[in-house]
Image (spheres, grey):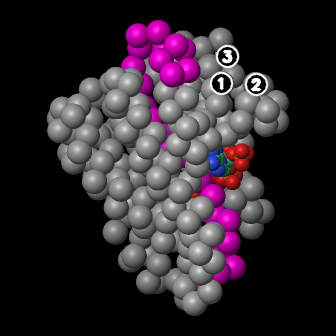
Amino acid sequence: MSVYCITGANRGLGLEFARQIASASPSKTTLALTRSLSSDLADLNKVSNSNTHILECDTGNLQSIKAFTSSAAKALNGKKIDFLINNAGINSAPEQTSLSIGPEDLDEQIRVNVLGPAKTVEYLLAADLLSPDARIVNMTSGLGSMAVSLSITPRKCATYSISKAALNALTVQQSGDLREKLGEGCVVVCMDPGWVKTRMGGEGAVLEAEESIGGILECVHGLGEGDNGRFFTYTGKEVPW
Ligand SMILES: NC(=O)c1ccc[n+]([C@@H]2O[C@H](COP(=O)([O-])OP(=O)(O)OC[C@H]3O[C@@H](n4cnc5c(N)ncnc54)[C@H](OP(=O)(O)O)[C@@H]3O)[C@@H](O)[C@H]2O)c1
């Protein structure tokens, strides 16, 4: 029976992952993570079922990620994670360009968007909570692609774009390192959800969350060993680095 784990599941795309997984596969276990259990969890509670475990994990805080692995071990009771969706992310200074980078803004985005997914994988592996055939999805952005960014004039969201490019590089590193630890069955990819109507994407976005996440789940469920270390968009099309 598959086990899913989604960071940042209380709203936006993470919530849509939790909703679609719980409704399509009610018997599947989902760890739906939220930065804080004191957050407004009404929407997440609404889409959850008896196999959904809502756990706290602030992906910008290493102690919180560590503490989460202990609560995950209890909730999983011997089961392992088959699908880890590193979804939590921030775009905290979209107005900055490469000529006006705020040092603290860059630090924060690297901490949440890059170090968070890195340590989530590292600590789950150390706790022996990843299945040997795990699919690990790092939620990136088209803005993390050098090729896509080069085609956008004027350039957009410099610090976010830099952090997502670093997340893409992390994906490539994890795709090699995890094969050594878990074996040839595991697959690590990064995925661009498209421009989606969420708090981050804004009202002007072109896609509904339902379509983006439906496409991502279809792509993720179809991943084979040869896809390790690749970069896809929500339609399953490969994105140039
Ligand atoms: N929407 C788009 O158009 C778009 C495009 C490309 C890529 N993406 C990527 O897709 C992912 C989801 O984006 P979204 O549109 O759903 O964004 P969103 O609407 O802003 O939601 C972000 C989610 O991440 C969580 N989060 C942020 N920092 C966190 C932390 N330190 N610890 C735990 N959770 C944290 C938020 O929790 P709180 O409620 O606690 O803040 C929220 O649940 C992100 O990685 C984003 O970069 C989105």
Residue 76 location, x and y as percent?
A: 49, 15
Mark pair 1, 3: CA separation = 10 Å
Q: Amino acid at mark 3?
A: Asn
Magenta-drawn stretch contains 89 = yes
Q: Residues within 10 Å of mark 2 (few under 14, many from 20)?
A: some
Q: Are marks 2 and 3 in contact (CB under 8 Å)?
A: no
Mark pair 2, 3: CA separation = 8 Å
Query: Which residue lies under the disc numbered 1?
Result: 54
Could you say whether the residue bearing mark 2 is in a helix, strand or loop? helix
Q: Amino acid at mark 1?
A: Ile
Query: Of tags 1 and 3, which is closer to the observer?
Result: 1
Magenta-drawn stretch contains 206 = no
Is 58 on the left-hand or right-hand side of 46? left
Is 33 on the left-hand or right-hand side of 148? right
Q: Are marks 1 and 2 in contact (CB under 8 Å)?
A: yes
Is 25 on the left-hand or right-hand side of 44? left
Residue 125 location, x and y as percent?
A: 35, 31
Q: Is residue 9 visible?
A: no
Q: Read off the magenta span.
A: 70-97
Residue 18 numbered tag: none
Query: Which residue lies under the disc numbered 3?
Result: 49
